[in-house]
Image (cartoon, rainbow, N blue to C red):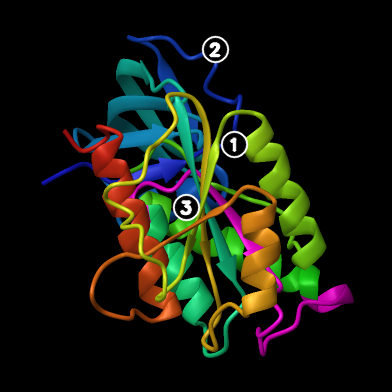
């Protein structure tokens, strides 16, 4: 069974060397020592969410936290192609289900999208609270899937903002794939970049409107289909990310 993962803040593991020790304190330290009752000699990993992983064992559990004996320090490089899920806001927590599963299969960045047909609306204080909830969701999913990197969650985009983002990605050599049930190009056959970003755009429950799709395509996006079936907004993104991750060699 794989070792449990505990999260430190980015940068806090930079000075920790193999053969040294690290004090896992705060909420994560209490969770490891008090809630999970990890004891001396047990395997644990500590990651900083930015690619650094400490592989070690519990040396001692103190009132200050869990002292980890570091056996190895692993730095995972940035992937050459960043997988970005642009997830339309959806009702019934289906959008959060999507980003949770997408995190587990390897997405690098999540972008909330206020699509024209989104029933859920992020404005003002609600936008800040909703984004904080998404941050918590990807953080928990990254821990559960034993990832060393926690996906970024960007500020929500409206239609104009997404068109601008699409234009910038395409101009930089990346690709933008809009999942659409009427598309003829299969996602499995579309060409992918060697570097940069690969954006996957998923609409809300009511789908992406013709005008909305037209503006994205005009900005450089390509409409693609996943397969013969129409998937829910909570399912389409993770399936697409998994297919792309396999094509990019991440699962080999």
Q: Earlier in the sequence, mark 1 or mark 2?
A: 1
Residue 181 badge: none
Q: Residue at x 30, y 34 (%)?
A: 248
The residue lying toward the viewer, choosing from 211 and 161, is: 211
Q: Which element type, helix, strand or loop, lies under badge 3?
A: helix
- Cα–Cα gap, marks 1 and 3: 15 Å
Q: Which element type, helix, strand or loop, lies under badge 2?
A: loop
Q: Is residue 174 left or right of residue 73?
A: right
Q: Is residue 173 above or below residue 152?
A: above
The residue lying toward the viewer, choosing from 94 and 28, is: 94
Reading the image, the residue beneath label 2 is: 15
Q: Is residue 220 left or right of residue 97?
A: right
How busy is the neighbourhood of tag 2: few (under 14 within 10 Å), some, or many (20 plus)?
Answer: few
Residue 9 badge: 1
**Eye-nearest disc, 3 or 2:** 2
Q: Is residue 13 left or right of residue 121?
A: left
Reading the image, the residue beneath label 3 is: 30
Q: Is residue 34 visible?
A: no
Give percent across and percent down for residue 205.
51, 86
Q: Residue at x 48, y 24 (%)?
A: 195
How busy is the neighbourhood of tag 1: few (under 14 within 10 Å), some, or many (20 plus)?
Answer: few
Q: Which residues are magenta?
A: 104-126
Q: Earlier in the sequence, mark 3 or mark 2?
A: 2
Q: Is residue 94 visible?
A: yes
Residue 120 falls in image quadrant: bottom right
Which residue extends farthest right?
Answer: 124
Q: Which element type, helix, strand or loop, lies under badge 1?
A: loop
Quarter the C terminus occupies: top left
Q: Is residue 52 above or below residue 213?
A: above
């Amino acid at each position: 069974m794989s070792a449990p993962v505990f999260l430190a803040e980015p940068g806090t593991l930079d000075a920790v060397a193999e053969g040294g020790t690290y004090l896992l304190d705060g909420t994560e330290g209490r969770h490891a020592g008090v809630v999970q009752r990890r004891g001396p000699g047990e395997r644990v990993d500590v990651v900083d969410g930015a690619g650094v992983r400490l592989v070690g064992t519990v040396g001692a559990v103190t009132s200050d936290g869990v002292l980890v004996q570091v056996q190895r320090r692993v730095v995972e490089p940035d992937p050459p192609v960043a997988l970005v899920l642009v997830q339309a806001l959806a009702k019934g927590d289906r959008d959060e289900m999507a980003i949770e599963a997408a995190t587990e299969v390897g997405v690098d960045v999540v972008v909330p999208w206020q699509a024209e047909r989104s029933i859920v609306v992020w404005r003002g204080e609600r936008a800040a609270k909703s984004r904080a909830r998404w941050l918590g969701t990807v953080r928990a999913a990254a821990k559960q899937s034993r990832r060393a990197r926690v996906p970024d969650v960007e500020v929500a985009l409206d239609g104009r903002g997404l068109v601008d983002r699409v234009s910038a990605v395409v101009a930089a050599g990346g690709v933008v794939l809009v999942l659409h049930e009427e598309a003829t190009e299969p996602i499995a056959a579309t060409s992918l970049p060697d570097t940069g970003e690969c954006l996957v755009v998923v609409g809300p429950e009511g789908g992406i409107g013709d005008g909305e799709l037209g503006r994205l395509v005009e900005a450089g996006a390509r409409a693609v289909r996943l397969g013969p079936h129409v998937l829910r907004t909570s399912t389409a993104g993770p399936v697409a990310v998994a297919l792309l991750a396999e094509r990019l060699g991440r699962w080999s």
